[in-house]
Image: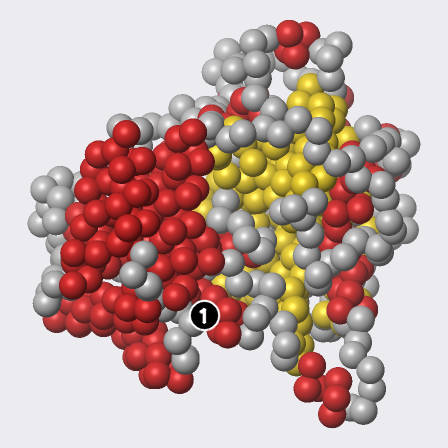
């Protein structure tokens, strides 16, 4: 009896697109629809062979992925014949439609159940050994020895298979009967050690309900299970001499910034920052190292009067670094397995960068910046296949323009990977030359015929799904409320890429999207708008507290003079109704506030900072909306802390203590007695001989005020 290739029947068009490319799949689908099928033969061992009218022969044995198929066509790599073989086999099986036997074969059961939920955890060690070489499994054991933290997401639908997000790459499992069709977005693509680690993560995650939220797993190699004693954690990370030394250095560095201010000359701080960075790198604390890097970048941006500097972001990063170390120490000393292991909080086992395979990226917008000595840009991309967010960063020195004897180049006209920046920021990139760091920073090397760019279209974000794209404002708010705080999550470049933003990058897209109100705040130089459902939509009739609006707030930036006008034109309906909006989102008094970077309308995509300046009338603010009292109080307190951090506590005038007391009294009257006590203690702590707890006091107060503001 000829074997049934259940693994081929399970490959959806989305899976084939990931395993091959969209062009081959679309062409093969057209040929199948037109009845232009090859002649198929299935051998007793399950090898499927296809003979095409042009004489090309293609064969795919069991246990081999599409890349390993044999094809006589001139193509050196993937080709349409391999995709056509799979689709033709599926069409033949559908037309044959055999009656189910009393005792169907396992492959037939798997194929018939292709629409039901499943988990890669059901693959046993025998399946693992049959699909991977011993050297690959050994490499996976070395990767697992670092105890990487992997986010596993259960099966959701035929088009949303199980996925594991490793620190450096993502693995998708497209077949429930064969591991060879698992797809990793690293350069190797399939059959790599990352797939094995992802499989172990699913096993250790336990049962996962379909559609459930991601579960974080600290992966252990099976051979190590009996060597760890407690079975769930390695040796303590925070108790070593090197770890304590780094914590002391960061504490002293933070204290210096609080006492003398971020405006102090950086020459005295450079060596201390470099020493802390090197020690974090030696310990393998990637997220701590990344936080130190961002802190140093912000200090440099402040000195250069760059538009990248934001005092609130500086305060946020300072508090995050302190809290990340405290949270890791707490997890490290927990009696049982903590909800979030210290290795995840610190970024242990997250190393270097990984070269990516064939990659498609869709732009979510860009942020431009400039200062006295240079200029640059951050372009945010989403990968529709893995739903990962990446950031491409570039900067240029103004000295280079002067040396060349020319006028300063137009920022959007500067070339990145062989393309103008404007084209990349407003496009979809398809490339084979990309590398990605763990924090989501991506680089694309120029290469002939290796990278292509197509313009964004109104449907470019259709393949994005939750949690990146939220189907309603309610869902967006719920997701933001459930997200763990920044200081325990892996650091992502996209979180700080937007100037002045400290939120999460998301896409909001829902039916009947309409502009409820908009106005220009001339004093603050900010364009405000509220987005919700149209008045004739049934959900719009719900109480206002159940359907909050999405508040857009876009400040004017000198580096992108056309952004505000572009947003105003889109809100006015110049390019048709809104379909979706992307940007960095945070909660403010329960309302989602987004700094938009790009929008999709029914007619076109609008990347705000890539638009040419075109003056547009801006509606001035009518009725002034006072923020809620508690939110305003938290904002005032954060502004006071940011001022202290910028100027330095040593350099505050005689009125500093009085202002702190006034602010503390307001906090106390609002019921925030513990926050008031912290604030009152700052001047006293400053005068004391021992200032050891000052950094923690200020960081904790900052974190509490951020929470109150939400």
271 with respect to 503 (left or right): left
Residues 566 and 246: in front is 566
The N terminus lies in which quarter of the figure?
top right
Residues 425 and 102: in front is 425
Residue positioned 75% across, 47% down in the render: 564
Q: Residues within 10 Å of mark 1 (few under 14, many from 20)?
A: many
The picture places residue 278, in percent across and down from the top left corner, at: 32, 77
Quarter of image, res 668: top left
Q: Is residue 88 above or below residue 78?
A: above
Q: Residue furthest front?
A: 654
Residue indicated by mark 1: 299
The picture places residue 374, in percent across and down from the top left corner, at: 65, 76
The C terminus lies in which quarter of the figure?
top left
Residue positioned 31% across, 56% down in the render: 656
Residues 66 and 466: in front is 466
Residue positioned 78% across, 35% down in the render: 619
The picture places residue 107, in percent across and down from the top left corner, at: 52, 29
The image shows a total of numbered marks equal to 1
The answer to whether residue 85 is visible is: no
The answer to whether residue 645 is visible is: yes
SS at circle 1: helix
113 with respect to 347 (left or right): right
Q: Is residue 279 above or below residue 192?
A: below
298 with respect to 699 (left or right): right
Residues 535 and 232: in front is 535
Quarter of image, res 181: top right
The picture places residue 74, in percent across and down from the top left corner, at: 81, 63
């Amino acid at each position: 009896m000829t074997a049934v290739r259940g693994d081929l029947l399970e490959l959806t068009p989305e899976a084939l697109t990931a395993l091959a490319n969209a062009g081959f799949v679309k062409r093969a689908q057209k040929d199948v629809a037109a009845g232009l099928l090859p002649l198929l033969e299935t051998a007793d061992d399950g090898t499927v062979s296809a003979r095409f009218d042009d004489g090309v022969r293609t064969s795919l044995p069991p246990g081999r992925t599409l890349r390993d198929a044999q094809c006589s066509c001139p193509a050196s790599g993937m080709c349409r014949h391999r995709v056509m073989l799979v689709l033709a086999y599926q069409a033949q099986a559908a037309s044959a439609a055999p009656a189910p036997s009393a005792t169907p074969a396992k492959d037939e059961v798997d194929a018939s159940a292709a629409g039901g939920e499943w988990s890669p955890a059901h693959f046993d060690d025998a399946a693992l050994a049959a699909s991977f070489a011993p050297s690959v499994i050994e490499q996976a054991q070395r990767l697992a020895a670092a105890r990487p933290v992997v986010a596993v997401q259960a099966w959701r639908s035929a088009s949303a298979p199980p996925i594991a997000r490793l620190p450096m790459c993502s693995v998708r499992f497209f077949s429930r009967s064969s591991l060879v069709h698992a797809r990793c977005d690293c350069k190797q693509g399939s059959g790599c050690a990352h797939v094995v680690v992802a499989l172990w993560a699913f096993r250790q995650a336990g049962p996962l309900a379909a559609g459930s939220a991601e579960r974080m797993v600290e992966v252990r190699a099976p051979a190590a299970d009996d060597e760890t004693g407690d079975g769930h954690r390695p040796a303590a990370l925070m108790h070593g001499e090197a770890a304590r030394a780094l914590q002391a250095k960061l504490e002293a560095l933070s204290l210096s910034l609080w006492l003398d201010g971020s405006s102090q000359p950086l020459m005295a701080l450079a060596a201390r920052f470099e020493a802390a960075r090197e020690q974090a790198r030696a310990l393998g604390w990637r997220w701590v190292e990344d936080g130190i890097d961002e802190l140093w970048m912000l200090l440099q941006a402040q000195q250069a009067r760059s538009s990248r500097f934001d005092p609130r972001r500086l305060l946020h990063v300072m508090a995050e670094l302190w809290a990340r170390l405290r949270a890791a120490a707490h997890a490290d000393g927990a009696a049982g397995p903590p909800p979030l292991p210290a290795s995840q909080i610190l970024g242990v086992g997250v190393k270097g960068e990984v070269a990516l395979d064939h990659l498609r990226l869709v732009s979510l917008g860009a942020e431009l910046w400039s200062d006295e000595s240079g200029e640059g840009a951050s372009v945010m991309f989403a990968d529709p296949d893995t739903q990962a967010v990446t950031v491409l960063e570039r900067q240029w020195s103004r000295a280079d323009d002067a040396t060349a004897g020319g006028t300063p180049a137009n920022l959007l006209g500067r070339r990145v990977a062989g393309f103008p920046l404007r084209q990349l920021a407003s496009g979809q990139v398809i490339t084979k030359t990309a590398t990605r760091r763990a924090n989501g920073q991506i680089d694309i090397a120029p290469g002939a015929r290796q990278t292509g760019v197509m313009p964004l279209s109104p449907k470019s974000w259709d393949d994005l799904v939750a949690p990146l794209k939220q189907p309603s404002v309610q869902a967006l708010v719920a997701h933001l409320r459930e997200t763990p705080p920044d200081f325990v999550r892996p650091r992502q470049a996209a979180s700080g890429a937007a100037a002045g933003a400290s939120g999460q990058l998301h896409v909001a897209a829902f039916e009947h999207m309409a502009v409820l109100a908009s106005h220009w705040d001339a004093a603050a130089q900010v364009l405000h708008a509220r987005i919700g459902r149209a008045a004739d939509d049934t959900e719009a009739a719900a109480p206002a507290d159940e359907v909050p609006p999405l508040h857009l707030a876009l400040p004017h930036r000198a580096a992108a003079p056309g952004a505000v006008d572009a947003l105003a034109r889109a809100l006015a309906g110049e390019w048709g109704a809104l379909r979706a909006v992307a940007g960095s989102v945070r909660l403010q008094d329960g309302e989602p506030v987004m700094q938009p970077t790009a929008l999709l309308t029914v007619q076109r995509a609008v990347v705000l900072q890539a638009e040419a300046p075109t003056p547009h009338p801006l509606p001035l603010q009518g009725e002034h909306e006072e923020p809620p009292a508690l939110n305003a109080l938290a904002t005032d307190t954060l502004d006071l802390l940011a001022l202290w951090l910028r100027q330095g506590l040593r350099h505050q005038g005689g009125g500093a203590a009085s202002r702190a007391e006034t602010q503390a009294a307001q906090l106390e009257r609002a019921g925030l007695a513990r926050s008031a006590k912290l604030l009152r203690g700052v001047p006293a702590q400053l005068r004391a001989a021992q200032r050891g707890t000052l950094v923690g006091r200020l960081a904790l107060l900052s974190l509490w005020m951020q929470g109150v503001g939400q």
